Image (tube, helix red, strand yellow):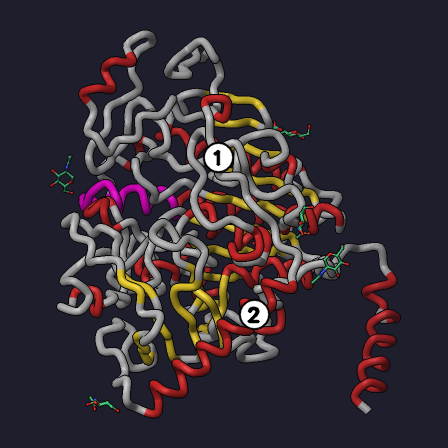
Amino acid sequence: MIVLWSGFCFLLWMFHPAYTAQTDLRPNIVIIMADDMGWGDVGANWPETVDTPTIDKLAQEGLRLTDFHAGASVCTPSRGALLTGRLGLRTGLTKNFGTDSLGGIPTNETTIAEILSSAGYRTAMLGKWHLGTQPGHHPLDKGFHSYLGVPYSLDMGCSDPPGANVPLCPACPEENSVYLYDSAPSDCIMDPALPLYRNRSIAHQPVKLADLATMYAEFASNFIHNTSSAPYFLYAALSHMHVPLAHASQYDNVTGRGEYMDTLQELDGLVESILSAVKQTNNNTLFWFTSDNGPWEEKCGLSGSVGPFIGMWQASPEGGGGGSVAKRTIWEAGHRVPSIVYWPQHIKAGTVSNALTSSLDILPTLTSLAGVNLPADRYFDGKDMSSLITGGVRSIREVLFHPINGNGEDGEIGAVRLGCYKVVYYTGGVPDCFRQSGPAQSHADSPLVFNLDVDPSESSPLDRNSSEYFVAAGLARMALMGLRQSVRADNTSTVDYSSSQEGRVCCDRDSPICRCPWD
Ligand SMILES: *[C@@H]1O[C@H](CO)[C@@H](O)[C@H](O)[C@H]1NC(C)=O
Ligand SMILES: *[C@@H]1O[C@H](CO)[C@@H](O)[C@H](O)[C@H]1NC(C)=O
Ligand SMILES: *[C@@H]1O[C@H](CO)[C@@H](O)[C@H](O)[C@H]1NC(C)=O
Ligand SMILES: *[C@@H]1O[C@H](CO)[C@@H](O)[C@H](O)[C@H]1NC(C)=O
Ligand SMILES: *[C@@H]1O[C@H](CO)[C@@H](O)[C@H](O)[C@H]1NC(C)=O
Ligand SMILES: *[C@@H]1O[C@H](CO)[C@@H](O)[C@H](O)[C@H]1NC(C)=O
Ligand SMILES: *[C@@H]1O[C@H](CO)[C@@H](O)[C@H](O)[C@H]1NC(C)=O
């Protein structure tokens, strides 16, 4: 009966007049991903935050996903998870690339941009890539038709003026004065000047941080206005909220509450200008705002808000009395990020969903909305959310794996979500603002289990003798065994994490700083 019925629906769909017409009904797609922006940095999530009126309005007119997680808690693996729909255990993307890395995203890992461009979409990317700089690993090699942006994080190379950071790092030295670096604080990254790419060529080095938002807005607007014949996909991976913080002079002290909030307002303004280009051209556009991971707590007042996800156990005596609970950790604030989806006429205004979702789900969702199939020669960790966002179903998954990143066993699973339960295998080892980092601890034999419904601050693990604990820990162990089996049976890739001077991105090989004159 079910088979017949679905065959009948399929026939109806085939002959529905809309599909016999020439018009392409597939939506344009805009993904905006901020860098190091916390769950609490969006006013719609956390009313203490008052600097994101545009993003809050998107939530009012669209869908806010409150239990949405980045695929990892640091940059490269998180971006890899979003673009491929697969965990680092499969793609090999388990830790960050450096400025002189030779490798990048594996050439046979398929990105959303490759899938959508094969389906007829025009694709463009702006902002931070962080998936390799060498030939074969550039955004233009992985499905994007046009690119403007920086190859990695804003602190991976000097800039002048240097922007706000902790510690404050010096501007790029003048040519032939590399020795000046000797006086820089030891935790400033002593790399060549930060480059800005326009497609494959370096447009500026060092990039002018304060001009980035304006350049990105202009690039997005040109792309949106100039793409009329096909649906488009824009992936806007903003550098905003990663240190060093910088913004256009019109945002100087606009909030009177410091550099972080001024920069957050600039981010909101940038979102507004991209949105307004969309509204001027075509409202059949799905607009998705999120972040790559939580705040970088080591940066103190220059890091964002974790909202209610304060990972209290880490500060307990068993946790070692402190340490970060955000970026680089498996605590909620490490990977639970803002997620707002706006698509007029398809998503009901003001919807809030607490369904367990992930940036891993973006690829299967967009693939489905574009009307194409997922590649059949590999497994995906992400799930199609299209009927969740349009209100057809209430949940798509009960299980989600959180990898360990930037510390310890990169890529291994450090926590498992099972409905409201979170089973934690690995804690500590990441510095907070006070430079405290509780000891890195494995809880493999006896994990901590939290019930996030009643304990979002992860303060009180369940009693290890309770039946609730027994069931949650047992199911998590089975889920992990299932994951390992699936990874073994899968086509997985390996990533070259080696580095050498040849991997440096430089506009002028004779310049030790890679400083080139402009204008
Ligand atoms: C990148 O190249 C494409 C194709 O030549 C072009 O349409 C696009 O404008 C270029 N992007 C930039 C930022 O120059
Ligand atoms: C299309 O893009 C070009 C730059 O590539 C720009 O000069 C032009 O203004 C854009 N068109 C519109 C309508 O924005
Ligand atoms: C920023 O503005 C606040 C009041 O809005 C003022 O008290 C403060 O001195 C200003 N700071 C700077 C650096 O101008
Ligand atoms: C898109 O919707 C807005 C209202 O939200 C409207 O003002 C605008 O004209 C629409 N744009 C197009 C191209 O139809
Ligand atoms: C792995 O790739 C091979 C060759 O393309 C294919 O036959 C096989 O089905 C793939 N395995 C999975 C799990 O998709
Ligand atoms: C848990 O059970 C063990 C042995 O089954 C026992 O030694 C221990 O006291 C119990 N702990 C609590 C908190 O009940
Ligand atoms: C990528 O290529 C390598 C080497 O040929 C292979 O082992 C791996 O299974 C491929 N990965 C995928 C996802 O097909």
* Left or right of 209 in this view: 110: right
Give, as a three-letter code, the residue at label 2.
Ile
For the residue pair 203 and 87, the one nearer the viewer reads as 87
Q: Which residues are magenta?
A: 255-268
For the residue pair 436 and 7, the one nearer the viewer reads as 436
Q: Which residue is mark 2?
A: 389
Residue 92, placed above or below residue 475: above
Q: Give the overall secondary structure of the magenta segment.
A: helix
- Residue 65 appears at what percent x and percent y? 45, 68
* Left or right of 232 in this view: 381: left
Residue 447, placed above or below residue 297: below
Circle 2 SS class = helix
- Residue 428 appears at what percent x and percent y? 25, 59
- The residue under the point 71% across, 43% down is 228
How busy is the neighbourhood of tag 1: few (under 14 within 10 Å), some, or many (20 plus)?
Answer: few
For ligand 4, tell me if the residue under mark 2 lies within 8 Å: no
Residue 293 among those drawn in magenta: no
- The residue under the point 31% across, 65% down is 442
Residue 267 among those drawn in magenta: yes
Give, as a three-letter code, the residue at label 1.
Ser
For the residue pair 342 and 324, the one nearer the viewer reads as 324
Q: Which residue is mark 1?
A: 498
- The residue under the point 38% across, 79% down is 421
Tell me the tag on residue 352.
none
* Left or right of 9 in this view: 429: left
Q: CA distance from mark 2 to mark 1?
A: 40 Å
Q: Quadrant of residue 331?
A: bottom left
- Residue 404 appears at what percent x and percent y? 39, 58
Q: Quadrant of the N terminus?
A: bottom right
Report the image quarter containing ligand 6: bottom left
